[in-house]
Image (cartoon, coloured by chain):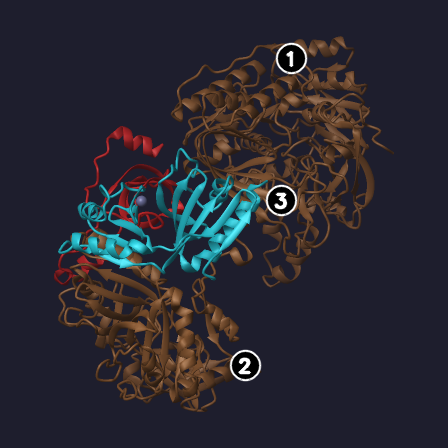
Chain colours: A cyan, B brown, C red
Amino acid sequence: MSDTMQLARSGFTLATAADRRRFVLQARPGTLDAAARALGLAEAPAMLATASGGAVTALRLGPQEILLLLDPAGAGDSLAALRTGLDAVAHSLVEVSDRQVGLDLSGALVEPALASLTSIDVALPAFPVGMATRTLLGKADGVLWRTGPEQFRLEIWRSFAPYISGLLDEAARDAAF
Amino acid sequence: MSQAFRVPGRGRVDSARTVSFTFDGRRFQGLAGDTLASALLANGHHLMGRSFKYHRPRGAVSAGSDEPNALVAVGSGPALQTPNLRATQVELYEGLAAVSQNRFPCLQFDFGAVNTLAAPLLPAGFYYKTFMWPRGFWDKVYEPVIRRAAGLGVAPTAPDPDHYAFQYAHCDVLVAGAGPAGLAAALAAGRSGARVILADETAEAGGSLLSDRTSRIDGRPAALWVADILAELAALPNVRVLTRCTAFNYGPHNMVALNQRLTEHLADPAPGMPRERLWQVRAKEVVLAAGALERPLVFEGNDRPGVMLASAARTYLNRYGVACGKRAVIVTADDSAYRVALDLHDAGVTVTAIADLRPAPDSALVRAAQGAGLTVLPGTTIQRAHGSTRVHSVELARLLPDGSVGRGQRWRTDLVLMSGGYTPSVHLFSQSRGKLVFDEELGVYVPGEPADRTRSSGACRGVYRLADVLADGAAAGAAAAAAAGLAAVQAPSWSVDVADEPGRGGYVGALPRRGKGLLAMAFVDFQNDVTAKDVKLAVREGFQSIEHIKRYTTTGMATDQGKMSNVNALGIAADALGRPVEKVGLTTFRPPFTPVTFGAFASHARGDLFDPDRRTPIDSWARAHGAVFEDVSLWRRARYFPRGSEDMEAAVRRECLAVRGGVGIFDASTLGKIEIVGPDAATFMNRMYVNAWTKLGVGKCRYGLMCRENGFVYDDGVVGRIAQDRFHVTTTTGGAPGVLAMMEDYLQTEWPELDVWLTSTTEEWAVIALQGPKAREVLAPLVDGLDISAGALPHMSLAEGTIGGVPMRLFRVSFTGELGFEINVPARHGRAVWEAIWDAGQAAGITPYGTETMHVLRAEKGYIIVGQETDGTATPDDAGCGWAVSKAKADFVGKRSLALPAMQAPDRKQLVGLLTEAPWEVLEEGAQLVARPDEAIPMRTLGHVSSSYFSATLGRSIALAMVAGGRAREGETLYVPMEGRTIAVTVTKPVFYDVEGARLNV
Amino acid sequence: MLLIRCPYCGDRAEIEFANGGEAHIARPADPMTQTDEEWAQYLYMRDNPKGLIAERWRHAHGCNRFFNALRDTRTDRFVTTYEMGQPRPEIDAAAAAEAAR
Ligand SMILES: [Zn+2]
């Protein structure tokens, strides 16, 4: 795929998200809280929730798993703090910056377009702003994160991007009818 | 002739908008709002198709989705013609082109109709009985003949140019059916604030009320009440009303599939508009308001065009403004037909007689008909309808008190309306696993205890009085909303000021006959041409279960799912068996309720979007350099890079020699990668792999082999130790998800105490394999000072560093048998690093190679490919990898199984090499091996060829094989029996090149 | 499509999950001490009840966790789901009857 993607239809836009360094942090739940504090967050976000502060956004994808998105500018400091905070505590921190790409979706048709791909209820009351979860998008895994009433971020594996954006393009076209 | 049967001032069609269409090439005119059937009927045209088996002329018998006869193909061309549409549901639009089906050469005259004369020769079970012998005749003689004669329409032959939408939806209350009960339910639920989806299969919500000129609700005509309710629903943001949308499948846990037709009724759909949309609705609660279907009567000639359901004639008249004939005879066992008679009479149709099967019908409606001067014949049945392409007369006869039938009398008519009472439409309820119970009073099955969170309301559960239907629907809607967790609100209520009392009576089974009538042409299942005689014959031949009778006669097995026929077939079977209907049981209602386009099921999953088409970061380079690709699981991998006019064989020979003689570059990015991190990482590795890991130093690599618990090889790959607590594991391309799932399984469910975590890093890294004796000289200048000499970075070691400033994990590994490196860089840099190496390698003659060359090179070295040499029944030792299995470890996944006696039997299939006598002879992969060429058939096979190539390096063919006791057979001659000849092969060691591995350690 | 309650993520559609077979079959602590018969029992023999089964599921396309579920094989109705490591819950007759319905 090309490094940036862009799609625009009436009521639906898709664009490659701003670059982030990404890490999968896995540890026992208590350690995740300690990690969150080291990163300047109050505590680890609850399941399916996100927390943000400074250069850090944390998406709680599993009971022992957090996806960290770091602003490249502040990433070094955050990582240093994290490593200090978790020194001698069992955990796994693996960089996945290039494993996946972020796609920002927005517009009035984002909900119905996504409803063509995921079996999850994406209506605002059921999927509020700040909720994030891994799900199946068509036949490919992806992380779905609501960033606004009509905004979603997808974090998907690099090679799935053409497939998922292709599906979304068709779904957005169909959603207009 | 222009719409001679149109009744001015009647119906909901737009008399100001004439619509032209063609049927079998003939031009007709109808009105906006017509269906194809109503428009043809407005032109006095009843003949719409030929039947499946006997090619009998058929007309529309209903006005809805239960139509079994009037199946047509709409559209034209090899891609766009849609077969088997019900003319009663096809909405008219300007220019619509429809053709009839099952006729040859034309609808009026059909050669196949000779089948009718041969009907005695085509009884139930005919195919089973007749075409058993001779066996070879079935596919060559019988089947082609039958297929040409039978069948429903012609499938399109070209790809479907339309596209189809798909959507999941979630709601509190799904209401299936927008008749009076469904509208009341949707409103009740909608007012509570529940998320409501109301779906109806027709173009316009309202159901039976749209055909009802009599009833008044809250003082207003029923159709206006419908408009009021729809207006209120439209104003509720939490309610979605979907018309032309059929609920066709009720799946587990309240997932209901709807198919919405978006363009079919439009002459000019907007560009980009999907033809249909498939909805998968997860509903907290479901309200079924599917209504009831009128039953036909079973008598000789009941399939003649012009014989229809009474309710259908009422719908054609009141909804479409069409009189279905000029002289009607009505045969009924139910009061409701009297309203039809009155409506027709009122519209100027002559109602010649109303034959009532009941001895003394008496109700307000009956009296009203009599008061209007209509002839009512109590205790009268119909013996036969006469006519061919249109009914012209009927024979009515008295039912005598002793149960026999009196002498018949002929009545001239062009329209025969039948009413056998109503059958609740329980299809969706039954699909939801709900139990049906027999209602003694109504004489039909109605929904009993539901299995899922569903409620039936109105006519689909046998509630027929309009006031009751509205109350029932409202109560169901309100209860559903409350059950979905919404605060209870007062259910709406309405007063029904004028309405007919629901019909009482009804008839199940075949009508009585005078004398020993065979009922040979009295149809039970119109669509599958099953007669009353067929059902009786099935019972006579010993079938007792209704499920068996159904399969033997095929009744209820056509695309209409027996909507009209099931209950009558049951009645005939019950009668023949001498048992009450409820003791015979009911067949299963299967989805779909009505046929659904394949395109809707596929929706976006076609063409490029059928599956994810995964491409590596280097894919674009390979494409630009002419690679030919192959699919490996979901990945697209470069198979070879032809130059000029090279075919694969030539390209692969060149690529192989280039790697062995110089340096080749290969995209290995698709290899699965898992990062295993945590203090217990080595412990976990020891348990998962057959190898020992504790002593593997940081910066070292090892070939890892993984078994399943049953001891059979599951996956393999090189593993590097990045740090004491961090392993970089590689898997096969296709095995990555399975390996990760299996690791997670053991970690989470067997050893949750281990502090170790797994992360898929397959896509984090682009992997560039640089292989060949010149690999080091190409790479060394690029790695920013990293020492990659043989001493610093020996075979099976790794180093972290940078390449052109890009972070890199460099593995000194080889799957070719040559000096080799696998350069892992973050995926975004993959192509740039590849190109840097490519440029640097020009002087050394660097050659890109693909998976095919990779396969040949590894086979020359005897390296296995899991899934090619192994098949899920090979142990590590079988595959020649016994050396990898740790003897010291107390346990690993598969160890105990490997200790089973059978896993060590000497005659297990083992990996060997094979050489043919003729060096150019390349064996076929999958070919079997036997000990003697002259062995009697069936020969005992000793094994099979698993990999086979022409080796350019060796100038001859090579093969790997799995052979029983193979290692002990080294030097033996075995044979490969092929069609017409046998190939002799010599068993060898499975390594053909550089046996001592000197080329690796340089 | 079944609706399955992941103990961590809540109700999700069946396509997000992978079935992991019968639950509560512990891998022997020291497999090498098992007789061939015992090992075969562990490896291959599974219950196939008509009725309630305790089985493992993995939220493969969600939180990636394994968990256990009690499901009635006749009706596909789930009684409950629970985390790995927890014992099979006791089910009262009413709940079992409801699952069988
Ligand atoms: Zn989950």
Q: What type is the residue that disc 1 sits on?
A: Arg
Subunit bearing disc 3: B
Q: Residue at x 69, y 35 (%)?
A: B88
> What residue is pinned by disc 1?
B220
Marks 3,2: beta carbons within 8 A = no
Q: CA gap, disc 3 to disc 1?
A: 38 Å
Up the image or down, B144 lies above or below A34; here it is: below
Q: What type is the residue that disc 3 sits on?
A: Met
Q: Residue at the right extreme?
A: B1
Residue B759 coordinates in the image, percent (x, y): 28, 58
> What residue is pinned by disc 3?
B273
Residue B587 coordinates in the image, percent (x, y): 51, 36
Residue B398 or B568: which is nearer the viewer? B568
Q: What type is the residue that disc 2 sits on?
A: Asp
| For marks 3 and 1 on the same chain, the one whose residue lies earlier in the sequence | 1
Residue B53 or A68: which is nearer the viewer? A68
| For marks 1 and 2 on the same chain, the one whose residue lies earlier in the sequence | 1
Indicate the quadrant where residue B193 lies.
top left
In what element is the residue under mark 3? loop
Direction from residue B257 to residue B554 in the image, left or right? right
Indicate the quadrant where residue B497 lies.
top right
Residue B518 or A144: which is nearer the viewer? A144
Q: CA gap, disc 1 to disc 2?
A: 80 Å
Direction from residue B758 to residue B90 in the image, left or right? right
> What residue is pinned by disc 2?
B647
